[in-house]
Each structure stands twice: as structure tokens, then as C-alpha cells.
Image: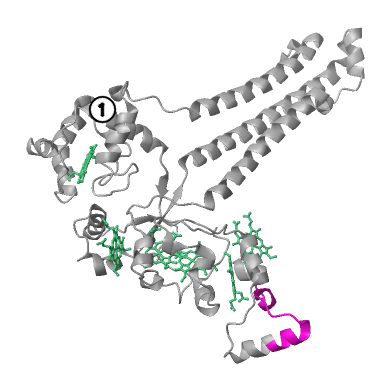
Amino acid sequence: MNIWSMFSQKKFRNSLHLWLWLLIFSWGTVVYAQDTLKKDAPANPATAGVDLEKGKSLWEGNCTSCHGLTDEVVVGPGMKGILERRSIEWLIPWVKNSQAVIKSGDKYAVELFNKYNKAVMTSFAFKDDEIKAIFAYVDKASKEVNVVVPPKETGTGTNQALSQQANGGSFNILLGILVITLVLVFAVLALMLSMVGKLLHQKENELAPEDREIVNQKFQPFSIFQNPAVLGGIALLFVLVSLKAGLDGLTNIGVQQGYAPKQPIAFSHKLHAGQYEIDCGYCHTGVYKNKNATIPSANICMNCHNAIKQASPEIKKIYRAIEKDQPIEWVRVHNLPDLAYFNHAQHTNVAGLACEKCHGEIKEMEVVQQRAPLTMGWCINCHRETVVDHAKDNKYYDRLMESHTKNSGKPMTVENIGGLECSKCHY
Ligand code: HEC
Ligand code: HEC
Ligand code: HEC
Ligand code: HEC
Ligand code: HEC
Ligand code: HEC
């Protein structure tokens, strides 16, 4: 008796149902897994049942000038994962009076204090519950905050961190799992059907008359896909998955334009470039001669801030960066994908375009915001529309322009000098 005889003929028909149910079940599992993963991680028992709103306002009012929610150092260490590395019993006396904890000889505290160049953390006369509330909030918020990934490209001594939505990342992994699961399920389904199909062929002669009738309809493994209900189901799945992917793409575009991330230091262009009229090129030293504009290093800030506003907590962050020989981790705002090539000097120096054409009213901005869409269509539109007339004293251009205008009767645009050629913008 071989294993296949388990599939007596009626059972075979039921087994089709079984497979359909399995399909639906695994889909359900994936959806369920996606849901549970999306839910907040359970609250840490040490800080359960506290007032998160209170914690938030205490944190923002007292701690953010020295601490951030990521693992990035501001003046003190970043708070990411703090409840994993310290117990609440340690944290309460620390916040109340960190110097006392250090003097008590606590090994961790002493090492930390030395690591931070003996910078003294302020003492806070908070109640235990208030401190618990702060860390409950910090724990929750640090898990939701943007993660900073290592720099893609280094300018002159500058570390330009890219920020990426942590949520977006895990969603992509889920989508991957989803697609792989679906493919597997369909593969198994197809395999089983073809096996059963073969089996039926062998067993045809042993069949009861009513079953033989069914088999004689010339069963084909993939005939299940002719069933309108199954087809409908597959089509629906397909539409849902592509809709999700499409929506994701759309929101990514939305995130780009108008993107204005919070920076590690509250640096204001409105104050420096607007009110004090410091030239853009004083800080963005590459902008007239190189591909990259570059973000200024802390040393450029020190040209002025070794004397100006020394006591400001924001300026102290510059001192700390220099002391520790660590670049300030500015969050990059504008960012073309790697496949595109853009050169500042070509546009600011050769074409003589103002920064505002592409970056908007930077001199009015407290926080830099991406104003242009930075899409291929945006580059190309400007190349179609912009007349090249900036090189009047360049003989080569003069002749080119003259012959162009004579031949076409229209002024010469960037398009006419090859500004729409793929290879100009793509490596
Ligand atoms: C004036 C700056 C400053 C302020 C304000 C400040 N801290 Fe700190 N904090 C530090 C420094 C610096 C350290 C590193 C240890 C040291 O040098 O004493 C530190 C260390 C810590 C640590 C230990 C971190 C670790 O990685 O183990 C915790 C927890 C902490 N601070 C919490 C807080 C909380 C909560 C507040 C607000 C209620 C706060 N700090 C306000 C400067 C500050
Ligand atoms: C005193 C120095 C200083 C001056 C002057 C200055 N900037 Fe900046 N700029 C910075 C710093 C620091 C950053 C990074 C922090 C930020 O984004 O706010 C920056 C960021 C930028 C960015 C965003 C970079 C990115 O990450 O995509 C643009 C665009 C920019 N500056 C344009 C200008 C323009 C235009 C001017 C002149 C009107 C100007 N800047 C003048 C210091 C300066
Ligand atoms: C050419 C001189 C100059 C340079 C270079 C310069 N700043 Fe300033 N900065 C100023 C002046 C002037 C003020 C206003 C001081 C005041 O309000 O009294 C100021 C104010 C600030 C403030 C506000 C401080 C506060 O608490 O009010 C911050 C933050 C700041 N600068 C950051 C930076 C950073 C970061 C850099 C380097 C990227 C930089 N500055 C480069 C001249 C400069
Ligand atoms: C023709 C449009 C255009 C003009 C004009 C322009 N920029 Fe940009 N800028 C861009 C684009 C596009 C990026 C993104 C580049 C990338 O991601 O490779 C960018 C990025 C930047 C950055 C980010 C860091 C870097 O090194 O690229 C700074 C700073 C900046 N621009 C400053 C300026 C300043 C200052 C001016 C004026 C002197 C200026 N830009 C003029 C289009 C422009
Ligand atoms: C505000 C208008 C404007 C925008 C926006 C713009 N450009 Fe340009 N671009 C110009 C002008 C004007 C020139 C002509 C410079 C010259 O005469 O060589 C030019 C020239 C170029 C060239 C050299 C073309 C050649 O034939 O040598 C490249 C490459 C280029 N741009 C890439 C880009 C990319 C990539 C973007 C988008 C990220 C972009 N540009 C956005 C105006 C623009
Ligand atoms: C003036 C500059 C410019 C020219 C000319 C240009 N591109 Fe692009 N292209 C870009 C920029 C900038 C991006 C990235 C913008 C984005 O991600 O939306 C891009 C993106 C792309 C992408 C990726 C699209 C995506 O969704 O990621 C493809 C493919 C592409 N270009 C093909 C071409 C081809 C083919 C040509 C020639 C017919 C061409 N490009 C000419 C600037 C240009």
C-alpha cells in the first residue's frame, strides 16, 4: 500500500479544499504577524503605569539641551536603549544627583563621567514617579524616532548623516516576507496539484464510476486557476500588494519635498545668512568651484563662536564636537539618488543661477527645508526653459549661440547644448 492510496477519490476532491484553506490560513498568518509587529513593544515593567505626557514635558523641558533620543551624543550620551543598559533603581538617584552616585564609587558612573570629560550633569529635584515617567517616555519615543545611518559620502571633514524612517525599513522587510511566503505557498500548491494529477492518472482504472467521470473531464493540475473564485482571489491579492507598494512610493516622494529634519544644533540660516548677511560661500566652501557645496566643519563655526555666545548651550555643542574630535552630525536634507549626477559649480558659477532658484528662500529659514522636488522632470523642465546667455565673452559659446539662433530662430536653451542627454546626468 503506498502513501498515495490515502487519497481515495472523494478525499481527493476534499484535499483541493484543504489546500485552499491552507492558502487562506497562511495569508492570514502573514497579515497577523504584520499586525503584531506593528504594535508597540510592550511597556517596560519597571516604568509601567506612569504618566507619559508628564514624562514628555519633563524630558523636553529639562533634558533635551544635553541628550537626544537616538544614540547620538549631544552633550551627554544618547538615550537610545537606556532602559536596557541601566535599571530604573540606578537611574533615579542618578537624575536626582549624579555627582553623588559618582562619588559613591559606582564603577559605571565613574567610567561614564570620565568618558564625558568630567562634564557635570545638572541635578534635578524630581520625585521617583516623575523620573520613571521621563524614562517611560524616553523608552517609547526613542523606539519611534528616526534612526541615523552612517554617512554615505564625506565632504571636507564633514559627516553628513542620512536619516531614514525606521518604520519604513521594517515595513519593507515585512513586504519581503509577505511576497516570499506567497511565492512559496503557490509553489507548494502547484507541486501538490501536479503530483495528485499524476496519481489520478495511474489510479484511473481503480476509480468508482462517479469519480471516473470527474477524472475523465481530463483533469489538469492548473485547472484550479480556471475557477473564477480562485482567479478573483489571486487578482485581489495582486491588486492589494501592488497598491501597498504604490502607496509606499508615493509617500516617499511626499517625504522628500518639504523635508525639514530637526538638526543636532539649532543653527539658523535666517540669523546667519539673513540678518548677519554671511555669504553662502563662506560656509559652503565648495559651492562655486566643486560638485558638492559641502557642509561647514565645526572649525568654520569657531571662527566666530570662539568669541560669540560662548555660554549658549547650543554653542557648547560645537565646543564638545571639537573637544571630542567628532564631526557634528548634521542631518542631510537634499539627497539625489546615487544614479544621478549633479554639479554645483556648473549651475552657480558657469550658469550663474542663484541658490534660491533651487533651494527657495534659505535666508528666511530657521530650519532648512527642501523646497524643490529634485525629480528628473524638475531638472529637465528647467533645462528646456532656461536660455543660455551667460557666456557672452566666451568665443565658443558666442559662435554656438549665433548659429543656433540663426538656424532655429529661437534662443539657445540648455537642451540645445545637450542638457537632456541621459549621460550628462547619469553615470
Ligand atoms: C547640562 C547637560 C545635561 C542635562 C541638562 C542633563 N544631562 Fe544627563 N548627562 C549629562 C552628561 C554630560 C552625562 C554623562 C555623564 C557625566 O559626564 O556626568 C549624562 C548622563 C546621563 C545618563 C546616563 C546615560 C548612560 O548612557 O548611562 C542619564 C540616564 C541621564 N544623563 C539622564 C538625564 C535626564 C533624564 C535629564 C533631564 C531630567 C538629563 N540627563 C539632563 C548631561 C546632562
Ligand atoms: C554660517 C555658516 C552658513 C552660512 C553663511 C550658510 N549656511 Fe547653509 N548650512 C550651514 C550648516 C551648518 C548647514 C547644515 C545644517 C542645516 O541644514 O541647517 C547648512 C545647510 C544648508 C542647506 C541644506 C543642506 C542639505 O543637507 O541638503 C542648504 C541648501 C544651504 N545650507 C544653503 C545655504 C544658502 C543658500 C546660503 C546663503 C544664502 C547658506 N546656506 C549660508 C551653514 C551655513
Ligand atoms: C561669521 C561669524 C559666524 C559664523 C562663522 C558662525 N556664526 Fe553662529 N552666530 C553668529 C552671530 C553674530 C550670532 C548671534 C549672536 C547673538 O545673538 O548675540 C550667532 C548665533 C548662533 C547661534 C544662536 C546661539 C543662541 O543661543 O542664541 C547658534 C546656534 C549658532 N550661531 C551656530 C553656529 C554654527 C553651528 C556655526 C557653524 C556652522 C556658526 N554659528 C557659524 C556668527 C557666526
Ligand atoms: C540648479 C539647482 C541648484 C542651485 C542653483 C543650487 N543648488 Fe544646492 N543643491 C542642489 C541639488 C540638486 C542638491 C542635492 C545634491 C545631491 O544630493 O547630490 C543640492 C545640495 C546642496 C547642499 C547639500 C550638500 C552638498 O554638498 O551638496 C548645499 C549645502 C547646497 N546645495 C547649497 C547651495 C548653495 C549655497 C547654493 C548657491 C550658491 C546652491 N546650493 C545652489 C541644487 C542646486
Ligand atoms: C533652475 C534651472 C536648472 C535646474 C533646476 C537644473 N539645472 Fe542643470 N543646468 C541649468 C543651466 C542654465 C545649465 C547650463 C550651464 C552651462 O551653460 O553649461 C545647466 C547644465 C547642466 C549640466 C551640464 C549640461 C551640459 O550640456 O554640459 C548638467 C549635467 C546638469 N545641468 C544637471 C542637472 C541636474 C541633474 C539637475 C537636477 C537635479 C539640474 N541640472 C537642474 C539649469 C538648471
Ligand atoms: C538633467 C538631468 C537628467 C537627464 C538629462 C536625465 N536624467 Fe534621469 N534622472 C535624473 C535625476 C535627478 C533622477 C533622480 C530623480 C528621482 O529619483 O526622482 C533621475 C532618475 C532616472 C531614473 C530612475 C527613476 C526612478 O524612479 O528611480 C531613470 C531610469 C532615468 N533617470 C533614466 C534616464 C534616461 C533614459 C535619460 C535620457 C533619456 C535620462 N534619465 C536623462 C536626471 C536626469
Q: Which quadrant does the C terminus fall into?
A: bottom right
Closer to the camera in the image, 20 or 113: 113
With respect to residue 278, does 319 lie above or below? Answer: above
Quadrant of the image occupied by residue 424:
bottom right
Quadrant of the image occupied by residue 94:
top left
- Please indicate whether residue 39 sits to the left or right of residue 248 in the image: left
The response on whether ligand 1 sits within 8 Å of label 1 is no
With respect to residue 41, does 10 lie above or below? Answer: above
Quadrant of the image occupied by residue 200:
top right
Q: Position of residue 314 (x, y in %)?
A: 26, 54
Closer to the camera in the image, 70 or 50: 50
Residue furthest to the front: 275
Residue for badge 1: 132
Q: Where is residue 112 in the image (x, y as percent from the top left)?
A: 18, 43
Q: What stretch is highlighted in magenta?
A: 402-420
**Number of numbered callouts drawn:** 1
